Amino acid sequence: MSPHRTRRRIPDATVARLPIYLQLLGDQLEAGVSNLSSEDLATLAGVNAAKVRKDLSYLGSYGTRGVGYEVQYLVYQIRRELGLDHDWNVVILGAGNLGQALSGYGGFTERGYPIAGIFDVDPDKVDTVVGGVRVRPLDDLAQVVAARSVSIGVIATPPAAAQDAADRLVRSGVTSILNFAPTLVTAPLGVTVRTVDMAVEMQILSYHEQRRALAASSLRSVPGDAGRNQTA
Amino acid sequence: MSPHRTRRRIPDATVARLPIYLQLLGDQLEAGVSNLSSEDLATLAGVNAAKVRKDLSYLGSYGTRGVGYEVQYLVYQIRRELGLDHDWNVVILGAGNLGQALSGYGGFTERGYPIAGIFDVDPDKVDTVVGGVRVRPLDDLAQVVAARSVSIGVIATPPAAAQDAADRLVRSGVTSILNFAPTLVTAPLGVTVRTVDMAVEMQILSYHEQRRALAASSLRSVPGDAGRNQTA
DNA sequence: GATCGGTTGTGCACGCGTTCACAAAGCCGT
DNA sequence: ACGGCTTTGTGAACGCGTGCACAACCGATC
Ligand SMILES: NC(=O)c1ccc[n+]([C@@H]2O[C@H](COP(=O)([O-])OP(=O)(O)OC[C@H]3O[C@@H](n4cnc5c(N)ncnc54)[C@H](O)[C@@H]3O)[C@@H](O)[C@H]2O)c1
Ligand SMILES: NC(=O)c1ccc[n+]([C@@H]2O[C@H](COP(=O)([O-])OP(=O)(O)OC[C@H]3O[C@@H](n4cnc5c(N)ncnc54)[C@H](O)[C@@H]3O)[C@@H](O)[C@H]2O)c1
């Protein structure tokens, strides 16, 4: 029926690792490596080789026993699975510190997420140019989303305005939201929301820092793990 | 022996949620709420009530049956556990787009992570002022880290320089690193590294977007979950 | 001080993700 | 054609996190 049949669902944990493999495989390709074993890739990614194989097996059987994986083909397959065989236009809401940094960042366009527009409520911000993109008024949002078939929106507004921003995005037809404001944002079913709260990351770090300090002050030897690292 | 005995280890998943509870409890406190049930907090956080209770139980038995938790006291306990009873000075490496946005952002100082310094290799950047902080040369790093007892470092350099930045941080005595460059960064045991790769977040979103598109094209009804939301 | 509605704290079962271990399978040299 | 070496793909065991269900407990009310 469909061009390629719908595969079994891929576990969230695997989906989160595929972009990392993709990144590493791209680097290897540039370095002239055309073939790679799961062991090699595991070392690069800092994870277990069996995990790499299981992750890749969700895509299909694209390896060759005794040999490994052809890098080029694997890149193609991962890209296809992640939906990277075409670009995804992105809109940003909030042209403050963070919004400007994001819109000026070439890495997104480079990786297939061109900025289709950046929007702000503040009339003083509107029509200024940040990172080569003109800031537009919020009234233009729905039109841009429709015209350039945007499905991903980024929230870079103050926390108090985050839910409003999300509502506007949803109303305009956006179905995926990346939220940088440190607040819970809710959206109707069928809309995916991911929140990245940098202060939370800091707090996780300081928790471990705190633990280390406590462990050091009580001079008993601690046989357990001292702390994870090599996180990708 | 020690002022307060070392508790059992808190699961990573719980540690990652504590900051969110803390945030919400702070909001409630401001709103004049002095007491809260696990059910209430669960609703605010968008999670299961049993999970909230289990999470909080790792801190100790600070709730009152039939009543709930005293917000003020709970805030105090979570802050203590996360090591937020004092500030944690932070250094930033790389004063580009992102580094400038981070140093100009008041939210970190506000939440107990004041910026002790921002550093760059580029002589043109050094001595310029971004977000009220003067950019310093990398040679000053070790001195600042020692003088202001910095234990957290943020990497905002290009990917190619990220490992070098991490090495410098470690050599200067930093033991926690938050890495925004899209690369694997390794550090010796005893140093915690967390990487936040925004492009990875995008790719996870577009995977779900892709899936939705496939599910819609094959017109069979999909009885499974349509997609998680209400993510904090 | 006994009863009752309400909420915590946790034992337990379940499900997901990780890891081990190995059979199946491909490659190469003889 | 075959045997030895290498690496994949996956069944199975394990461990961790989640959610349910309920006993223990608190405060209020009569
Ligand atoms: N700047 C950082 O480095 C940083 C770091 C971590 C988190 N954050 C978070 O990112 C968000 C933005 O931070 P910032 O430093 O850029 O803030 P900012 O105040 O510099 O910018 C916010 C912008 O959003 C605009 N805005 C307000 N309401 C809006 C709405 N309803 N729709 C569209 N635009 C609206 C404002 O006019 C302003 O230009 C905040 O929630 C902040 O907590 C920022
Ligand atoms: N700008 C964004 O919005 C954004 C978003 C996501 C990820 N990132 C990532 O964050 C990092 C920084 O991005 P950016 O846009 O600020 O880049 P940028 O090029 O604007 O800034 C990088 C800065 O780092 C400095 N630098 C180079 N090597 C250094 C070293 N060894 N030590 C200290 N400083 C050094 C450079 O002089 C430059 O000022 C990149 O890895 C990028 O991929 C940025």
Image (spheres, coloured by chain):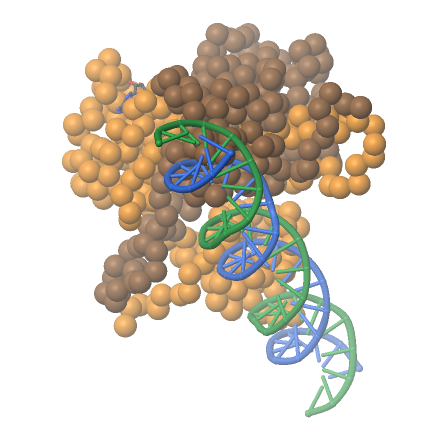
Chain colours: A brown, B orange, C green, D blue
Vertical order, B47 against A189 (above or below)? below
In the displayed structure image, the side of residue B51 where residue A35 appears, left or right? left
Residue at the spot x=58%, y=50% of the render?
A: B28
Quadrant location of residue B141? top left
> Looking at the picture, how far across and down is residue A165, in whole percent?
63, 27
Q: How many marks?
A: 0
In the displayed structure image, the side of residue B221 where residue A130 appears, left or right? left
In the displayed structure image, the side of residue A8 where residue A200 appears, left or right? left
Residue at the spot x=32%, y=37% of the render?
A: B186
**Does the rendering let one see residue B231?**
yes
> Looking at the picture, how far across and down is residue A109, in whole percent?
51, 14
Quadrant location of residue A203? top left
**Quarter placement of the N terminus of chain B:** bottom left
Vertical order, B23 against D23 (above or below)? above
> Looking at the picture, how far across and down is residue B97, in whole percent?
39, 19
**Quarter placement of the C terminus of chain B:** top right
> Looking at the picture, how far across and down is residue B207, in whole percent?
62, 28
Vertical order, B75 against A190 (above or below)? below
Residue at the spot x=68%, y=29% of the render?
A: B211
Q: Nearer the viewer, residue B174 or B132?
A: B174
In the displayed structure image, the side of residue D1 where residue B68 appears, left or right? right
Residue at the spot x=83%, y=28% of the render?
A: B219
**Does the rendering let one see residue A20?**
no
